[in-house]
């Protein structure tokens, strides 16, 4: 039986996450004047259509691209020595200390409650087109899975092979990977909830929503 | 000749060969790499030869803006695409030469890449110039019902011809290098294979077009290495290669130059005549279409000695080195022991004239190239990801090894094979005065090769070395 209280206490002991903001690609960096300790916000709006606080600009081939905060938090460190220099892809620009939100806490706890279907090996994973289309149209919780269902395309070293789901029948409750990104072996791809346990999962969600206090 | 700074838009062993060719020709270079490739030999070589300012980490080798941003930041004057990635992307080639700060593209001009990069268009162009081509669809198929009807027609045709087990090839129209291609033996499985190839093509090539062709059995796969000067002024060939030893996925594993050896092996047809015909057709077509860099004309030859042009690869190929070791150019001291095809490509790409004719080219001996991969030939050549813990070979004057993997002894930091790319580890090219000596040396090289490691499950790393050794004895037999 899942001990939600114990898990919440564990998370409360270290409720922060250090988020490194890195350059997504090469370019010339210009910071926008943020200082240490400044508070920033993440994307907002129903579809996260409003970007987070502007942190810097990255200019590549005359295209100026804004680098925005991905989560709310506090600026802990800024690499001002990079100002107006051409930087490589993946260069760290600054660090944000982020306090975990309710959704993130729920997600952490659900990872222990749901049946996790894990990546059998390091590779890129894609949903098969039929499932991908269904998720895009109606959300992940619209997809029912059962043993043997062809669900994924595994791409490694430029070879593609199908991968079937194995585990209890149920609905996809959470998707833990980005299509096209490398996933390490043993990392969860999806969290499946048997239909009989949906109410139990909902209880966990309600409890976290009631007990977790959001902070800036 | 003006000194250029060439951005090498590629990775691994080909980036290393381009880098060395740049140094040989007196040009500067800039390399790029991704996080997954931090251990690659091209990263180490670039740092050792050019220092930290000659190497930049990018988010992807496949993002043209990344490549061009680095080119601008480093004041590069030319881009070499290597093979794969942008090598046959005419949009990239066009962008390189037509931007505000134009660069030279080391490869054919973009209209050539566009026209010959499309297999179907190549087929039409070849037919127009009297070059024989494979029977099959002459345009990409986008509709499943239409594809099914075409497959039905080809199966029925094969049955009429008395072929017991008919077979149809389904391949991505924009694909190449053996990727996105499958055989189908019956109509029941055709639909699922068609969908799989279409999805692959859509995701990887941004073009859902699929070709349906008759599968010709028991053929040999030959190539002609062409070098041509701008505007169809001059074109020569550096002989033929036989690339018939392939994996199940139709990817080459051993290449041999020349393509047949009628001097030591019996053939049921006039093999010398076939080699002469395919080189003649290839050079003729290159001149007719105004080809202007290095390129490969790929042929299939049936057991009856009929050659059909399959496609044209408008780029340097992995196996260029095996043509290089068997070719010589009179009057060129640097080509007395072989031709550096990549250096020739760079010269042509930077606008230099070819400077010699076919009469100046002659051939010497037999070359064999082995592609050494982390894969399991016993399990359908499935890639075997993992780490290499020991790697090395004995240097010989007749041997060239191109690899991004560091030479390693047990106990040193192992090399992690990146997951994002082909499992190619090394190319070994041996030269012999004749086929028998080349084979003997090939086996000697493979026997002496140290290649050990573990896969991701902790078991011994599987490689294709035993497969290469077994197949060495039968190369060029047809």
Image (cartoon, rainbow, N blue to C red):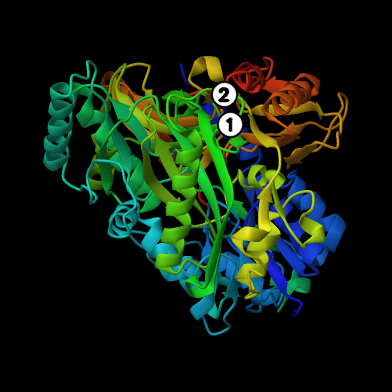
Residue labelled with disc 1: B261
Q: Secondary structure at mark 1?
A: loop
Number of marks in the image?
A: 2
Chain under numbered label 2: B
Answer yes or no: are tags 1 and 2 on the same subunit: yes
Pick the front one: B477 or A207? B477
User: What is the distance, in whole Å, between disc 1 and disc 2 at their CAs?
Assistant: 6 Å
Residue displayed at 67% across by 70% down = B355
Residue at the disc numbered 2:
B265
Residue A11: x and y, percent? 59, 36
The residue sitting at 44% across, 29% down in the picture is: B249
Please tell me in which quadrant of the rendered image residue B227 appears: bottom right
**Considering the image in quadrants, where does the N terminus of chain B appear?**
bottom right
Identify the residue at the far bottom of this view: B100
- The image shows residue B14 at horizontal and vertical percentages of 67, 50
Report the front residue among B327 and B266: B266
Task: Look at the picture and state if B434 lies above or below B212.
Answer: above
Residue in view at x 31 percent, y 55 percent: B130
Please say whether residue A51 is visible from this viewpoint: no
Up-down relation of residue A126 to residue B183 (above or below): below
Which residue does the image show at 51% across and 29% down from the upper left? B246
**How many residues crowd around disc 2 within 10 Å: few (fewer than 14), some, or many (20 or more)?**
few
Instruction: Point out residue B26 in the picture as x, y percentages from the top left corner.
Output: 81, 69
Q: Quadrant of residue B290?
A: bottom left
Q: Are marks 1 and 2 in contact (CB under 8 Å)?
A: yes
Above or below for B100 versus B73 = below
Residue A102 is situated, as x and y percent measured from the top left of the image, at: 46, 45
Q: Nearer the viewer, residue A26 or B202?
A: B202
Residue A124 left/right relative to B208: right
Q: Residues within 10 Å of mark 1 (few under 14, many from 20)?
A: many
Q: Is residue A138 left or right of residue B369?
A: left
The answer to whether one can see residue A101 in this image is yes
């Amino acid at each position: 039986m899942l001990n939600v209280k114990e898990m919440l206490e564990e998370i409360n002991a270290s409720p922060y996450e250090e988020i490194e903001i890195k350059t997504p690609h090469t370019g010339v960096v210009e910071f926008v004047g943020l200082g240490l300790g400044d508070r920033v916000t993440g994307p907002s709006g129903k579809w996260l259509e409003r970007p987070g606080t502007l942190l810097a600009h990255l200019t590549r081939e005359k295209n100026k691209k804004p680098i925005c905060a991905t989560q709310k938090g506090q600026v802990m460190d800024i690499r001002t020595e990079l100002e107006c220099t051409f930087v490589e892809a993946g260069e760290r620009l600054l660090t944000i200390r982020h306090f975990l939100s309710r959704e993130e806490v729920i997600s952490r706890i659900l990872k222990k409650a749901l049946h996790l279907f894990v990546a059998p090996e390091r590779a890129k994973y894609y949903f098969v087109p039929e499932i991908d289309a269904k998720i895009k149209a109606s959300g992940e919780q619209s997809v029912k899975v059962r043993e043997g269902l062809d669900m994924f395309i595994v791409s490694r070293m430029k070879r593609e092979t199908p991968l079937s789901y194995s585990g209890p029948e149920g609905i996809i409750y959470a998707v833990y990977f980005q299509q096209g990104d490398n996933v390490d072996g043993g990392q969860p791809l999806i969290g499946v909830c048997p239909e009989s346990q949906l109410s139990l999962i909902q209880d966990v969600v309600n409890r976290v929503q009631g007990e977790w206090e959001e902070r800036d | 000749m003006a000194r250029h700074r060439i951005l090498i838009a590629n990775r691994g062993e080909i980036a290393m060969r381009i880098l060395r060719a740049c140094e040989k020709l007196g040009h500067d270079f800039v390399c790029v790499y991704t996080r997954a490739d931090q251990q690659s030999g091209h990263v180490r070589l670039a740092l050792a030869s050019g220092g930290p300012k000659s190497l930049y980490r990018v988010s992807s080798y496949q993002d043209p803006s990344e490549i061009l941003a680095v080119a601008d930041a480093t004041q590069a004057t030319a881009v070499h695409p290597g093979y794969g990635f942008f090598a046959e992307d005419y949009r990239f080639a066009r962008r390189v030469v037509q931007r505000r700060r134009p660069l030279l593209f080391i490869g054919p001009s973009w209209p050539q890449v566009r026209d010959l990069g499309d297999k179907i268009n190549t087929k039409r162009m070849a037919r127009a110039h009297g070059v024989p081509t494979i029977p099959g669809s002459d345009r990409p198929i986008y509709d499943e019902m239409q594809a099914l009807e075409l497959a039905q027609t080809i199966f029925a045709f094969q049955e009429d011809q008395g072929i017991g087990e008919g077979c149809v090839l389904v391949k991505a129209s924009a694909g190449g290098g053996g990727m996105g291609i499958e055989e189908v033996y019956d109509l029941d499985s055709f639909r699922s294979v068609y969908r799989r190839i279409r999805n692959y093509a859509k995701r990887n090539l941004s073009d859902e077009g699929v070709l349906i062709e008759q599968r010709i059995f028991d053929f040999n796969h030959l190539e002609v290495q062409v070098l041509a000067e701008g505007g169809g002024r001059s074109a020569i060939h550096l002989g033929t290669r036989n690339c018939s030893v392939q994996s199940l996925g139709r990817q080459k594993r051993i290449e041999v130059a020349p393509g047949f050896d009628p001097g030591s092996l019996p053939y049921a047809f006039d093999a010398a005549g076939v080699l002469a015909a395919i080189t003649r057709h290839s050079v003729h077509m290159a001149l007719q279409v105004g080809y202007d860099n290095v390129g490969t004309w790929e042929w299939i030859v049936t057991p009856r000695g009929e050659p059909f042009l399959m496609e044209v690869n408008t780029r340097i190929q992995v196996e260029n080195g095996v043509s290089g070791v068997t070719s010589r150019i009179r009057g060129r001291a640097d080509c007395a022991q072989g031709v550096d095809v990549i250096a020739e490509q760079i010269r042509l790409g930077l606008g230099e004239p070819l400077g010699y004719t076919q009469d100046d080219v002659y051939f010497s001996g037999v070359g064999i190239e082995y592609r050494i991969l982390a894969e399991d030939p016993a399990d359908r050549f499935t890639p075997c990801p993992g780490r290499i813990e020991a790697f090395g070979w004995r240097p010989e004057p007749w041997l060239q090894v191109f690899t991004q993997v560091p030479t390693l002894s047990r106990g040193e930091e192992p090399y992690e094979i990146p997951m994002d790319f082909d499992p190619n580890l090394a190319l070994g090219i041996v030269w012999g005065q004749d086929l028998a000596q080349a084979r003997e040396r090939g086996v000697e090289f493979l026997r002496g090769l140290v290649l050990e490691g573990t896969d991701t499950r902790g078991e011994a790393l599987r490689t294709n070395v035993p497969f290469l050794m077994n197949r060495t004895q039968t190369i060029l037999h047809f």
